[in-house]
Amino acid sequence: MSFRRAVASNLVVQAIGPASAFFTVFVIARLGGPADQGQFAQLKAVVDLTVALGCFGFPQSFIYVINRLGASAAVLARWSLLYSLGFLPVALGGVLVARRLGYLGSGAERLDAVLLLTLTAALLVLHGLWRGVYLTHDPGIPFAVFTIVPAVALLACVLLAMFAGSNAFERSLLGSSVVTIIVTALMMRPVTRDRNGHYGDLPWSSLLSNGVHAFLQATLIAIHPLVSYGLVRLEGGGNTEVGFLNVGVFLVQGLSVPISMVAPLLFARWTSVHDDALMRRLHARTLALLGIGAAVGVTLALAAIPIVPLIFGAEYATAVLPVQMMLLTLPLLCHVRVIAPALHARGRPGVNTAAAAIRVVALVLGGLLLSRTTGDVLVAVAAAWSIAEIASAAVILFGLKLAVQPLALTVNVP
């Protein structure tokens, strides 16, 4: 399958992923309410961060060492299983810290949630590692299916739980992760049939060194929603206010999912092909795309006025203004997420890491300052979210400019 066809098929099939995420939030909003949604958002954010820490940048490293160094995909797949088992104690420690900070609720009754979320994180780490391996096996529709399984399974488990009158979302998270591993293990069978190679044959130094920046970036991206919810709680909000903010977080993350899911394909492509013309095109079209993005952002913000209460319920009218503020910078987010894998593939992953770090710092400082200035924690954190996106994008775009300048010098040399 050609690269363009692989991207197109992934966009079509992977649209099921954000659609499933949308219906998950919709079901919780309609059958539960903002408080339930806030609880679910915090639990899922804890799992997402733990998974990002557990993957340690290995999925991107797997792509690199398989494509560039000829490492065995089968050996990496088997090693991933051992690694996910070894990660269990670390996952337990991370979830216990989250419980200590209040993200899981309080009281002894939440101890079972700790164990369930720990198992969930370990299983999803395995899925994340396998996903990196599977991309090198088949980047077409099967990879897209491989990617959307967690979201589809989570929707099914949440539906069963909510219709049964239960808001024990940690059980839904574990159930979905078990289904995910069963389905993807069956898909991995063609990859693992090769019995040649040994763990000692793997390029361990390249695996570790190439995944550092990817690990830092994934961790900083995953911690961003958790920090947002933490700011709301720090400034006096509860699960209901977190639920309102989560509408904006969900819409921003959900609408940008197609770009995020195609990013590994772009990275895999650009690690094997040095496309200097691509870098110049990305830079040359930045101003025009930013102008279009600003118009799209305003349109999305205006559309949120009738759509948010219509979809989620009249009680979500409080969430409209925060959602509007977060949607304004959504097109900018999508633009820089296309540039980021190009910079990484060109040997500049530090730019993306710096941008992700600045994004978190700007969110914290902006959220605290605006909250104590305006007195409205939801609007303050939403505004800080958008400010953080702008600060992060500025770093990415500056990095793109620096990456293009040497190319221009090379082209103009007689």
Image (tube, rainbow, N blue to C red):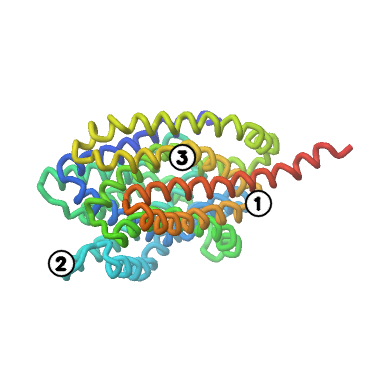
In the rendered structure, which amino acid carries the disc numbered 3? Thr
Looking at the picture, does residue 62 appear above or below residue 318? below
Other residues around mark 1 within 10 Å, as few (<14) / some (14–19) / many (≥20) = few
Q: CA distance from mark 2 to mark 1?
A: 48 Å
Disc 3 element: loop
Q: Say which of marks 3 and 2 sits in front.
A: 3
* Residue at the image point whose x is 40% and y is 64% from the top: 82
Residue 83 x %, y %? 42, 64
Q: Which residue is mark 2?
A: 109
- The foreground one among 112 and 122 is 112
Looking at the picture, does residue 4 appear above or below residue 193? above
Residue 375 x %, y %? 32, 54
Q: Is residue 194 left or right of residue 380?
A: right
In the rendered structure, which amino acid carries the disc numbered 2? Glu
Q: Which residue is mark 1?
A: 347
Q: Quadrant of residue 365?
A: bottom left
| Dots 3, 1 in contact, CB < 8 A | no
